[in-house]
Amino acid sequence: MTSDRVSQAPAARLVARTVELDVASLPEDLLTLLPVPGPGEQPTAWLRRGEGIVAWGEAARADTAGPQRFETAAEWWRETATTAVVRDDVDLPGSGLVCLASFGFADEPGDSVLVVPHVVVGRRGGRAWLTVTAPDELAPLPSLAPATEPPSPRGLTFADGAMSGAAWETVVAEAVARIGSGDLEKVVLARDLLATLDDDLDVRWPLRRLAADYPMCWTFHVDGLLGATPELLVRRERGLITSRVLAGTIRRTGDVSRDAALAGQLARSSKDLEEHEYAVRSVAESLAPYCSSTNVPEVPFVLHLPNVMHLATDVTGVTHDHDAGGEHDPAALLLLASALHPSAAVGGTPTDAAVALITELEGMHRDRYAAPVGWLDAHGDGELGIALRSAHVSGRTVRLFAGCGIVASSDPEAELAEAQAKFLPVRDALSGA
């Protein structure tokens, strides 16, 4: 069994300085500022509708694993943030000392990573800033200019991952049978797709494509995991908690009138509404102990994305002054993530039975797919999405992931078609066209 652990480099006290930038001086696409990937210059990003942060370099890093990975990460971030020297002229969520994080889905091995970037550029609500962080020193502010264009991928080929589509349909049918026998109510099953290129992938290429094609999603990259997720696990901002729950999906056709009819069909679908109810209930129950009040809308709305439509519900709450680590605990967001993960939207209901069935049937390791990814600051504020519509990059190989919620009325063929649709964002972003 993998034991809980944390390793970090360096262990020195961090010094962070944030200055305000003239927002008009920045390019419309912040991703164009990311330098060519190289040793010590790996890019990180978290963007939605042109706002968020892009970053590069490493001032500090922690790698955690095992069932207590969130708690171990929280201890590291709490110590790192409270001992840091921070001069912040902007004082917005995302300015000052910032960490980007990506967690493993399963308890074993649960490999996870937290990175404090050397350089961060942020934009929010008509304001922009630059943060530079370094161990034990006040580092000079770099000049900012668009980097060289990333090369388009060459020689792209795709192959099945852990199992073929036909084999995965059989797995879905087995899951439906288990649900029918009363073992559980819902399980989320995923599959993977392997892409191979002629050269190592420059992650800036798919990031730009994803941000442009899916502006309503959160485009991200942390330590080789990239994607554009439509689902926000948890946002914490000065005492207000928000979680966007997605469950229930239908593929778009591109025809406006036909898609409008499909949206209505989705909103009335008993199968999709049942799946969505499990996911919303899971999140609301997990947040309740940390909130003095919560709001759960009675009816979901239909979220329209370029490739699919989802049933969606925004669950909100107000934190207790001293719960979730306290109002000013730097690790508050990580403790909330630990309480929420895995929700029914990515695991199932009941959680323990669903996760056990995933381990039994899925035939692959999810790694950091469908787990929390995002950023947090030294005040405990931040955003963590669920790493959906995502892929893991390793040199010339890219491993894409897609999953579907399975309930008693699920049809294996329809679920396979839904999974194929969920591959499209990253698959298209890899295209050299």
Image (cartoon, rainbow, N blue to C red):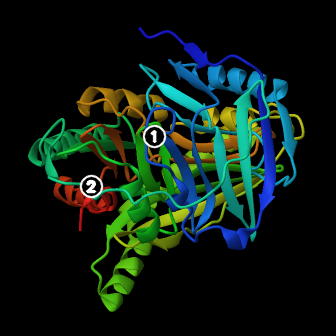
Q: Residue at x 63, y 57 (%)?
A: 144
Amino acid type at circle 1 is: Thr
**Which label lies toward us, 1 or 2?**
2
Q: Position of residue 415 (x, y in %)?
A: 24, 55
- Label 1 and label 2: CA atoms lie apart by 20 Å
Q: Is residue 249 visible?
A: yes
Q: How many marks?
A: 2
Quadrant showing the C terminus:
bottom left
Q: State the image coordinates of residue 273 (x, y, percent, origin top left).
A: 45, 62
Against 28, residue 208 (above or below) is: above
* Residue carrying label 2: 419
Residue 362 at x, y percent in the picture: 26, 34
Task: Report which residue position mark 1 lands on.
Answer: 349
Horizontal arrangement in the rendering, residue 23 relative to residue 387 (left or right) = right
**Spot occupied by residue 274 in the image (x, y as percentages of width and height):** 44, 57
Q: 207 left or right of 153?
A: right
Local SS, label 2: helix
Picture residue at 75% right of the left edge, 39% below the top: 97
Could you tell me if the residues under marks 1 and 2 are in contact, i.e. CB atoms within 8 Å? no
Crowd class of label 2 (few under 14; some 14 to 19; many from 20; radius 10 Å): many
Quadrant in which the N terminus is drawn = top left
Residue located 50% across and 61% down the image: 32
- The image shows residue 211, relative to residue 287, as above or below, that is below
Name the residue rendered at 30%, 43% in the picture: 190
